[in-house]
Image (cartoon, rainbow, N blue to C red):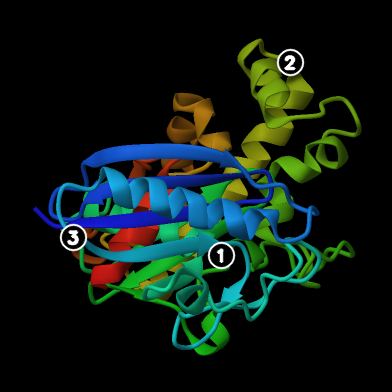
Amino acid sequence: MSQAIGIDLGGTRIKGVLIDTTTGSVLQQLITPTGDGEGSHWQRAVADTVQALSESATEPVQGIGLSAPGLPTPDNTAIACMPGRLQGLEGFDWSAYLGKPVRVLNDAHAALMAEARFGALKGAQHGLMITLGTGVGGGLLLNGHLYQGFFQMAGHLGHMTVNADSVHPDITNMPGSLEDAIGNVTVGQRSFGRYKTTHELVDGHRQGEPLATLVWLTSIRHLAVSIASLANAFSPEIVVLGGGIMQADEALLNPLQTFLNLFEWRPAGKKTTVRKAYFEDWAGAIGAAAFLND
């Protein structure tokens, strides 16, 4: 057995796990309030979480992986860019603070790593993950490894455009982005104020409400076009979909497959497999620990 610690640092809470890096089994898990905006409280909370998990280990800990919002440094030792949240996170040297080597990566990339090593992408050499929630994120698995790209920005799949003629730029100034087409943040705008959340929108669709059905299926069509475009660009074996919007289950997956049957290029019968993510709330922490072996 080989044991490692994974930390997922969020704006409201810290999730920590001790895992067996051979099987992905979670041996111990802890949740601690982050205290964002309370000075360095969250830094101390991470240290306390690491200490508690280290004490529960039954063998020397292989290492510490830390998942956080923002863009990491090229050597994955700190978060280089994360304006507006967790003041003090940018440039913070976790290895020096904790007195042990720490590998740091973006939280969406960590979710991909959890799926690649132990979940829906296990065994795949080429895959991608799209996280569908308040916003839309993602990550790329190329040749069996996380691809971070220049400035560690690769995998921001929610910020590809599905409507270049839109006059509504998203947070990255991209007009008509996938994030704006399906993210929970724009449900009110897309439904003319009728619905506030994706959950309400999907309920309306299931009840046969015409506006809800129009808005929901339009969003799924945009998602299908995006997946087909990404399949053309990267030729993944598997596309994994995660995030809170995936609670729609078959209300999302069935129409998605219908649209993919229309749009995906399938030479010689090649077809991209689409799977629901295996991990949910703990993906960031598990993936951070898995990243130690990438």
Is tag 2's residue or tag 3's residue first in the polypeptide sequence?
3
Q: Which mark is residue 157?
A: 1
Give the secondary structure at mark 2: loop
State the CA–CA distance, disc 1 to disc 3: 37 Å
Above or below: residue 131 compared with residue 109? above
Q: Residue furthest top?
A: 207
State the CA–CA distance, disc 2 to disc 3: 57 Å
Give, as a three-letter code, the residue at label 2: Glu
Give, as a three-letter code, the residue at label 3: Pro
Is tag 2's residue or tag 1's residue first in the polypeptide sequence?
1
Q: Residues within 10 Å of mark 3 (few under 14, many from 20)?
A: few
* Side of 193 relative to 206 (left or right): right
Q: Nearer the viewer, mark 1 or mark 3?
A: 3
| Residue 224 makes an appearance in the image | no
Above or below: residue 158 compared with residue 133? below
Q: Nearer the viewer, mark 2 or mark 1?
A: 1
Residue 89: % across, % down: 67, 70
Q: Quadrant of residue 28?
A: top left
- Report the residue marked by disc 2: 209
* Side of 144 relative to 149 (left or right): left
- Report the residue marked by disc 3: 60
